[in-house]
Amino acid sequence: MSIIKMKSRADCRLISMLLLLTGLVSLSGCHRLTLDQRVNAWVDSGGKSVPTYLTSEEIKRIEERRYGRVLGTTLAERVFWANGEGLRGSVKLRMKLDRQGDVLRCEAQPTDAGSPPGFTKLVTDVCWSSIWESVPEGLQNPIDGTFEVTAPLIASGNTSPISDYDRRHQRADVESRFFWNNVVAKQSINAFGKARFEFTANAKGQVTHCDVTLKKHYLRPERFHSDPALQKVLATQCLQLDLQQMSGFRVREDGVAHRVVFVEYLPWKKQVGKYSE
């Protein structure tokens, strides 16, 4: 079982750079260092070290470390975006993936007596709403190919102003969850994709126009299939929404709101909102 520590977006950008490595590596004299030291030299230098050579084993180890760090960073970031209310708490998330990166289990437990149940549920929902790349072979359980993660997640409240980037993502998350809960989750969908809702609404929150497009999910493009019937049902349900019930809903000076909302749908996302005691 792996322990994932949360990192910043800067780490995520650094990690993505590791994917560019195919054979070149390390500082002069790095051939004398251990495998972990060579890998850490690259990470700790911010990608500025200039290695001379990477063995196939080192490339595998870097990919495994990249996978774990990207997973941890992404979870932390998505929890932050979903936590627009600023809940404070500490939980331990247990997540299990199959070899393809499909989510098999999400269990969040508070690690602080004062941690509110709402934060535990939020983390659980974020987990069930996630999708991942295929798990590197070295991280897979040799028996069944699964990968189990234990990730500590702590929300201590905002200590600095939220950037415009994060504010936009928090707003998008609120809208996406509203459309998931009130439209997409009501359908029986056993597929991978992304629904794009482009709608117009009046000041009363009544939707006057709604176009729905189904798109491939970039992590599972081969598992997408066109579904005109689903597309039609989603558009019909969209027109019945009361957007005044959606947090942050507002209209322009002309009294009209025109927005585009994206909602990912995944076979296991139907577990969102279901919690074990």
Image: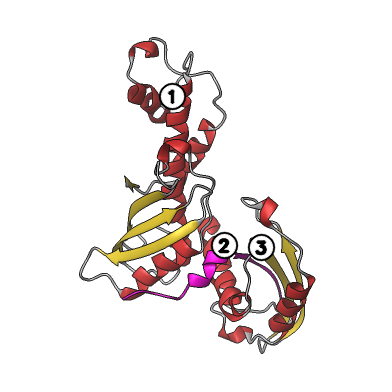
| Residue at 73% across, 74% down | 230
Which residue, as the protein is rendered here, is positioned at the far left?
Answer: 113
Q: CA distance from mark 2 to mark 3?
A: 19 Å
Residue receiving disc 2: 168
In which quadrant of the rendered image does the C terminus lie? Answer: bottom left
Q: Is residue 181 left or right of residue 137?
A: right
Marks 1, 2: nearer the viewer: 1
Looking at the image, residue 52 lies above or below residue 253: above
Q: Position of residue 256 (x, y in %)?
A: 73, 80
Label 1 is placed on what type of residue?
A: Glu
N-terminal of the pair, mark 1 or mark 3, is 1
Q: Position of residue 32 (x, y in %)?
A: 34, 11
> Which residue occupies 76% across, 63% down?
226
Question: Residue 85 lies in magenta, yes or no?
Answer: no
Q: Which amino acid type corresponds to the residue marked 3 in the rendered image?
A: Lys
What residue sits 60% from the left and 86% below the top? 244
- Name the secondary structure under disc 2: helix
Residue on which the image places disc 3: 194
Question: The residue under label 2 is which amino acid type?
Answer: Arg
Residue 172: percent from left, percent from top: 58, 66
Mark 2 neighbour density, 10 Å: few (under 14) some (14–19) many (20 or more): few
Q: Which residue is mark 1?
A: 58
Which residue reaches farthest bottom? 204
Q: Secondary structure at mark 1?
A: helix
Q: Are marks 1 and 2 in contact (CB under 8 Å)?
A: no
Q: For the magenta stretch, what is the residue range?
A: 257-277
Secondary structure beneath disc 3? strand
Residue nearest the viewer, comparing 93 with 243? 93
Give x and y (percent) for residue 170: 52, 65
Label 1 or label 2, whichever comes before in sequence order: 1
Say if residue 255 shows up in the picture.
Answer: no
